[in-house]
Image: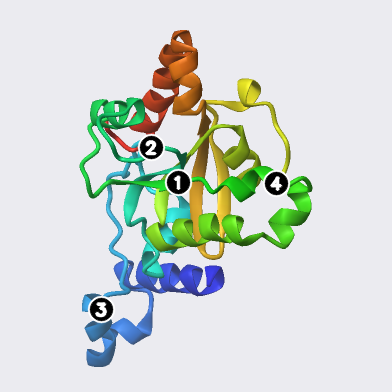
Amino acid sequence: MEQQFKKILQKTKAQKEQKDPLFKTFEGALFSDSSWFFHFQDNPIFLSENAPTKIEKIAELKGLAPLIQVLFLGDSFDGNGEDLLGKMIGAMKLSSNEFFRFPMQESLDEVTDLAMNAEVPNGATKDLYDIIQLKRPTIVVSLGATVTNILLGKREKLSTIHGQFFEKKIGECVYNLMPIFHPDFLQINPNMKRTAWIDLQKVMERIGKI
């Protein structure tokens, strides 16, 4: 693919400089209007910090562009009344079609060999993988240590890695994993709410909400 791309650029440059004999013919002139034709500009084009990455461009070309912005995994909310995470999601300015909340199954707590489970996932882990591939999020926010360690395939201290981005891939879905403290933990330790909110603000910045 890279070699083909270089050839196209060479052909285009040759046409612009009137050095390629093909473009002097009627058939060659037709190519200048083709969808693959690259037009050079005299002025440089500067890409912003939010410009799509190479992986994101490939995903878009394959029709694998993200379907939602944020997928929250490990939810324990039963849907009765307002909850802490729901309030935080509202404060993140996420519309209903930009996020999805998915619960954690208790059998994930039974996984002892995380590396083996990553290779041969149990049913609950497959459900996590399936929802990620189905929703194709830009960012997965893992709630708590259990889901975080399952997705990382190794045991890490949440106090050490929370608020960090980890690039992950499941199938053809590439996403960024962001671990935060579980909302249930925040209810017991309200002084940690600020820490969780700072982490979620990093998510907002990554998806262009701030």
Question: Which of the 4 quarters of the picture holds residue 78?
Answer: top left
> Does residue 210 show up?
no
- Contact between marks 1 and 3 (CB within 8 A): the answer is no
Disc 1 and disc 3: Cα gap in Å? 48 Å
| Discs 3/2, front | 2
Using the numbered discs, state the Cα–Cα distance from disc 1 to disc 2 in whole angstroms.
8 Å
Q: Earlier in the sequence, mark 1 or mark 2?
A: 2
Residue receiving disc 4: 110
Q: Where residue 77 is drawn, which disc sits there? A: 2
Q: Which residue is mark 1?
A: 103
**Secondary element at image label 1:** strand
> Residues at badges 1 and 4 in contact (C-beta under 8 Å)?
no
- Kind of residue at badge 2: Phe
Question: How far from the left and from the top, in percent, is residue 44?
Answer: 32, 44
Disc 4: CA contacts within 10 A as few (<14), some (14-19) or many (>=20): few
Tell us which disc is closer to us: 1 or 3: 1
Q: CA distance from mark 1 to mark 4?
A: 16 Å
Q: Earlier in the sequence, mark 3 or mark 2?
A: 3
Neighbours of disc 3 within 10 Å: few (<14), some (14-19), many (20+): few
Question: From the viewer's perspective, is the residue at label 3 or at label 4 nearer?
Answer: 4
Reply above or below: 130 against 41. Answer: below
Q: Are marks 1 and 2 in contact (CB under 8 Å)?
A: yes
Q: Quadrant of the C terminus?
A: top left
User: Label 4 amino acid?
Assistant: Glu
At a point 35% along the width and 39% down the height, the residue shown is 50
Ranked by sequence position, the earlier of labels 2 and 4 is 2
State the residue position of label 3: 34
Between the residue at mark 3 and the residue at mark 4, the CA separation in whole angstroms equals 57 Å
Q: Position of residue 128 (x, y in %)?
A: 52, 54
